[in-house]
Each structure stands twice: as structure tokens, then as C-alpha cells.
Amino acid sequence: MSKKYQHLLSPLRIGSKVVKNRMTAANYKKHFIQGGEEYPTENVITHFVNKAKNGAAIVCFPGIEFASRVPGDHYMPPYNVSNNFNQHYVCQVADGIHLFNGLCLAPLMLNLPMTVGSSFEPGKMPEFYDVSDGVLSMYIMGDPFCEMFGQHYSKPYPVEALKDAARVTVEQSLLLKSLGIDGIIIGNTRFLSPLTNKRRDEYGGSLENRMRFIMDVCRAVKEACGQDFIISTNITVPEPQEGGWTLEDAIEACKMLEGLADIVGIYGDEIDPRHVTQFEPKMPYAEACAAIRAGIADRPNRVIIETMGGYTDPDDMEEIIANGTADLISMARAFIADPQFGTKVYEGRAEDITPCLRCNKCHRSGGSDPWIDSCSVNPTWGYEHKIKRLFDDPTGVKRVGIVGGGPAGMRLAIMLRERGHQVDLYEKTDALGGLLKCAKGVSFKWPLDSYKDYLIRQTYKHGVNVHLNCAPTVEQLNREEFDYVVAAVGSEPAMSPIPGIDAPNVISAVDAYANLDKLGHNVVVVGGGEIGVETGMHLSEQGFAVTVLEMTGTLAADCTPTHYRSLFIRAWEKDEAEHGLKMLTNARVTAISSEGVTYVDAEGAETTVPADTVVISAGMKPKMDEALSYAAAGDSFYLLGDCKKVANLLTLNKAALGLAGLI
């Protein structure tokens, strides 16, 4: 065990069971790894067992349900364990996790209208039932993309339905225990919040009444399955709305759960903020979690407190455990960005852990993208079960020259060194990093800056021969007799054909980041895509008076939609309120002059916005001509990254993986 992380890697006792360390693999579905099978396939079994193999002490295995899949659902189907023929596959998951000294917990979502085996048959309970009357069905979703599905549910669940749900949960728990599952995760936070539970019976009103349903379920499961069957449940941090769930409620709830639940997870009060992005603090719920744990610290039989929300840095995690903020740390993206996260923690190699970008593309990279699992920094995610079959071992050591020291060039160089090849990397500037250099000093781009530093660190650590301030010629590369030459020279800003675009007060967004001292006070950003909005935010935070003009009706339409867009909106609205950032949609720019920028709005009215500096954010274009100028170099030649097609880190990392596997 690494002495560096002695608290994080220390064991913890839960009843008669011992948790090998304080790291848990959080509850998340790997949506697109299998097809319509109603049992975990070998792909899924391997994925979850590998979490225990690579350090997770508790592995949450989601997807277990007691019904068939919903037709037309693109997401991973439920593992229908009501079918006896599917049960032994679940046993294999639990057994594999146990093989590596881990515990396996299965989330049960207590989806009352769909409770199988109850007198309310699936699909038979009338619509518009919820915890209480007048509750928005998608409350705590937060994401505006989900609002289209929201409806006001007008009737509370009948008391008999709640009691029936508790009975069925016991039956399900007994079955899961027989399959080797060590415990369950249960919860329905809408019962707990006064904002969503307005019932007028024994399940609403006081905190004791609002806790009654979850306590009844926990008590019944413990009585049936035994005290050693682990129960984990979740509560939220205090809600900011008046009359909402409070810190005192959370502390009292933890006291009331003593002897009924073993673990209480603390997470955000809304779905989207739980999937923290770069716009939130690094550990957004740590302070509330520490207060809740401190409130029960003197209880001899207190529940174990688990903190959730964006944890990826083992140094932070060590401090969290050492200072008593929490007893366990739940992680999802840490194990996605780097499947060997736990192994590297045990070896004390935090500097080798791939940083998560908090981009939330792991849910789905974009609304029009294929239905596949993706990670911006881990191109093997979704392929880990077949990666060895896809790529042959190298037939010998090859010499490879890579032109371009941006993220594509660095990542390929690292992968090629891992395959045993000799690599020379040429960068025409005095530092590696490419466009990622723009992230330095930007308050909300710290994950990108960390990723840039990681790539640079790994490039040198892997023994890549780096040539800075060097733009090689074809002749120079051929003198080196490379087996392969790869052009990864990147992209450059695209400049729209707007009258006045060549004016001296016009600058690209890329150049603006590096030349703040050359900008005038009044800045107009032309282009309100994701980069344009981010540029406007950064410049306004630096004290400039900024107006962003977007020709369409939607700002940042190209950003990640799932668990990201709503948080992005909150961030730019904060800059609008605090820093005076102005953003206009349906504003088609028609001219640029030394005085300002002229645009036409949706009604055809023309307006000129005064501007000392005009920043153009009209996208990027490949440096394809520069890349192809190296086509005669080496025995084989390839293009990689933005010089081939402008995309993003997710795309270029996958391209680097594919190319490395061919060499």
C-alpha cells in the first residue's frame, strides 16, 4: 500500500464485512455496451469486475430490474432477474467482484408505478401519480432538455401502493442476496424534501413522516435479509429554495437511519449538478458533507457517510478521509477517465492518473452523435472488453516522426512508446500543448489545463524525443529514415467573410486568450457557439465590457446536452449578473469597423455595438495544406487530429488510438 494515501486505502468495517479501502465505484449505467440481451453480457461482466480488480472496494452494479425492457429504449436494457435463465449472469458479476476482494451493491430505484409483482401491475397504475399532488415529475432533473418530458402529477401514491412497494422490495432483496449481491442502494429523495412531499397522511408533513417510507423499507429489508446485508441510501445537501430540505434535516435523517441503513450517500439536490462540470467547485458538496458527518460524529452506532460529486484527485480524497469529511468516496468518472485509477492510487502514482475533463460526454457526446459510450480522455472506454482483439502486437520496433506537439501529437506519441516504438515529436513553438495552452488562467478551464499538463508530463516520462522550436522540412525528416511520419499540425481560426474582417481591431478567439493586454476595454465577440460563449465569459471575468453576438436563436448550441448544458447556462447567467456580460441571439453581423460591429436582428433592425476590439469565434479550419506538405516524408504517412478534420479531444484521442494500433 502506498504510504502516501494511507487514509484513503485504509479498511473500513461495515457490520461483519470489511471494505478494503475507502473508494467506491458509483452507481452509473454503461448505456451502450450491449444490445437487447436481458442479462449482463461478458462485456458488462468484465467492465464491472475490472473496477474491483483495479481498486474499487465497493462496486455498484446498476441495471438489475424485475421486468423486460421498454421497446424503443436505446439505453442499456434492464437485467431481468425475474427470468430464471438470466440470474446466473448476475451471479458471475458478484462472484467476479468478490474474487478481487470487493463488495457488490445493486441499486433498487423504488419506481412505484412500475413495481413488479405488486397488485399495481406494470403499466396498469394510472398516469399522473407521484409522491405528492402537484409535483413536477422531472423535479430535481434540472436539465432543460428534460423539461419537455415533465408533467404535473396530480395524485399522490396511495398508501397501499407504498406498503406494497416495501413488500416487493423485500422480495427483490432476498432474490438478490441469493445471487451473491452484498446489499442494495435504495432511495427516493422526493419523499424527503418538503418541496416535493406535500402529503397530508402519515408519509408527509414532519421529518419523521417524510422519512417513514424509506425507514419502513430499510427495516423490512434488514429483518428479512439480516443485519449483514448492506443497505445504502442517499440524501441531498441542503436545498437553496425557501422551505426546502435543510442541513438540520440531513443530520436528523442520518440519526433516524441508525440500525436501518449502513451507508448514507451525500449528493446534490438536483440531477444535473450531481454531474459536476468545470463550472462548479472542485469538490462542491464537501462542506455540507463535513457538516453532516460532524453532526453525527458522537453517535456510537452512526451511519457511514459517503461523499459524491466529481472526485478524481487522490490527494483531495486522502484529505477528505483524513480530516473526517466522509468515510467513503464514491466515484464514477475517475474510473471512466482512467480504468486503472485505483491501481495507480495503490502505487502512489497520482501524476500518472488521466484527469477527467468534467465534460459529461460519457453520457452521450452530443444529441446527434451515435449511440456509443464515449470518454474524451479514455478512447478505450466502450472497447475495453475487445481492445486486445482489435489491435495486434507490434511486429518490431518502428521509428516514428510526429509533426505537431498539440494534444493529438502528444497522445499518439505516448501510445506509440507504450507499444515499444521510438518516437520523435516536433513542435514549432517553445512549448508543447497546442490549443490547450488557451486553457491556462481561465477559471472554468482548469480541467483542460490539468489535462494539458498531464499529456506533457507523460510525453517526457515515456521517453519521447521532443524537439521544440522546430518545424522540420521533408528533407530533414527523410534524413532520419522514419518508418512512419504523422502530421498533427492542428487547425487555425476560421474568419467569416464579413466586411471589415481585416480591420486592425479584429482578432481571433484563440489569439485573444494569449493577448489580453492588447485588447481594448469594449469587446464584441462575433459567434455565440460554445467557444464564443466561453470566450465572452472569460473576458468579462477579466474586467472587459463584453457583448457576444450569435446569429442563430440559441447560444452554445454545440455544447454537450446531457447534464452539462443547464450548468453552462447557469455559469454564463452568473457572469451576466456579476460581470455585465451581454449576449444577443438572432444577431447577424453585417459589418465591422473601427467604431464597432453592426448587426441585423430578427425583425430586420440594424444596430451598431461600439467595440475597441472585435473577437471572431467562427470555428476552426484544418491546416490541411501544411499537413499534406509532409506527404513525401517517411515510408508511410498519416494525418491525425484537427489538420484532417476539426473535432474535439474525444475524436482525436480515438483517432490516435486507432492509428497507434496500426503501427
Image (cartoon, rainbow, N blue to C red):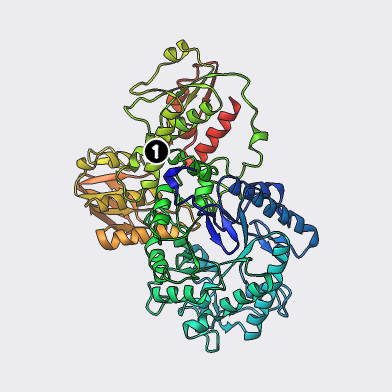
Apparent side of residue 186 relative to residue 552 in the rendered image (left or right): right
Inspect this view and state whether residue 608 appears. yes
User: Is 430 positioned to the left or the right of 224 in the image?
Assistant: left
Residue found at x 50% / y 12%: 481
Query: Helix, strand or loop at disc 1?
Result: helix
Residue 527: percent from left, percent from top? 36, 49
Residue 174: percent from the left, percent from the top?
A: 71, 68
Type of the residue with mark 1 = Lys
Image quadrant containing the C terminus: top right
The picture places residue 67, in percent across and down from the top left corner, at 72, 66
**Placement of 520 over or under 652, stated as above or below:** below
Q: Residue furthest right?
A: 85
Q: Nearer the viewer, residue 22 or 340?
A: 22
Residue ranking furthest to the top: 479
For mark 1, what is the residue? Answer: 452
Q: Position of residue 37 (x, y in %)?
A: 73, 54
Asked if residue 338 shows in the view, the reply is no
Rendered position, 596 above or below 327: above
Q: Nearer the viewer, residue 552 or 108?
A: 108
Badge 1 density bin: few <14, some 14–19, many ≥20, Cα 10 Å: many
Q: In percent of the image, x 74 and y 74: which residue is there?
A: 117
